[in-house]
Amino acid sequence: MSFRSVGRVLPTKGFLIRLRERTRLLRSGVDALKMKRDQLVKESQNLLPDLKRRPDIEKKLEDAYRLLRLAYAAAGPDEMRKAALLTMPLLTEMKIKSVIGVEIPEITMREFGLATSPSLNAVVIATARKLADAIKELIPLVNSEAKFERLAAALADTMRKVNALEKIIIPDHEAAIKYIEEALEEDALEEFLRVKKYRQLKRGE
């Protein structure tokens, strides 16, 4: 006899003992996966307030770019090139963190800003600061979105495993256990009847 997720089943006591132990471990695995699933859901829900900030940050970026066009028109290309030379490059560092066994990339901004100069146009300075502030708010949002995507993927994978165990693998094991138990009971009954018949025949001699 063969079961899809168990393989060939031997109707022996030894195989039954091993199958019961394997089923017990599978149930423990389901409990562990459900705990992980609940933790992943909680971590994901904690990110929702951060994710809701995207429209506000996008609005700030749009305002900054709108102001940038006005500054370019008011100050001219030479003033904008001067501001670009005074701007410190955006330096970032990425680390990988583990959250409930899920690898999450996290970006930190090490350096970014504008070295102001009295010779710079005031509109250009205000524009640069507004743009820098918007980008500084964007980095944490990007981190939250990346974390949410990784957690969502891990959550979907965990739920697939739980469903497979609960709906296919464990039921197959339970059916195999039942088949072995019934086969052993049938063998025991046949053995009992053979012994009984033998005794009856022996008494009749």
Image (cartoon, grey):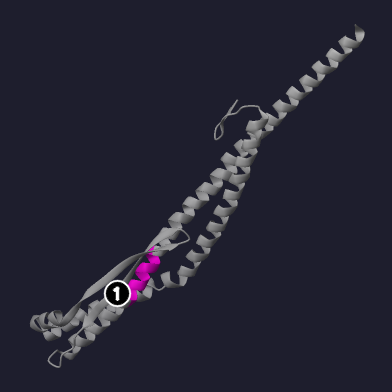
Range covered by the magenta-colored residues: 137-146
Q: In this view, does 160 lie above or below 201?
A: below
For the point 40% across and 68% down, which residue is it? 144
Chief secondary structure of the magenta portion:
helix
Res 26 → quadrant: top right
In the image, taking residue 202 as reference, residue 141 lies left or right, namely: left
In the image, taking residue 45 as reference, residue 175 lies left or right, namely: right
Question: Could you say where residue 35 lies in the image, as x and y percent from the top left?
Answer: 57, 58
Question: Could you say where residue 174 lies in the image, as x and y percent from the top left?
Answer: 65, 37
- Residue reaching furthest left? 78
Query: Is residue 188 shown to the viewer in this render?
Result: yes
User: Which element type, helix, strand or loop, lies under badge 1?
Assistant: strand
- Give the residue number, with chain letter if any, for mark 1: 109
Q: Is residue 101 above or below residue 9?
A: below
62 and 86: which is toward the camera: 86
Image quadrant containing the N terminus: top right
Give the amino acid at mark 1. Met
Q: In this view, does 91 lie above or below 73?
A: above
Question: Could you say where residue 147 lies in the image, as x and y percent from the top left?
Answer: 40, 64
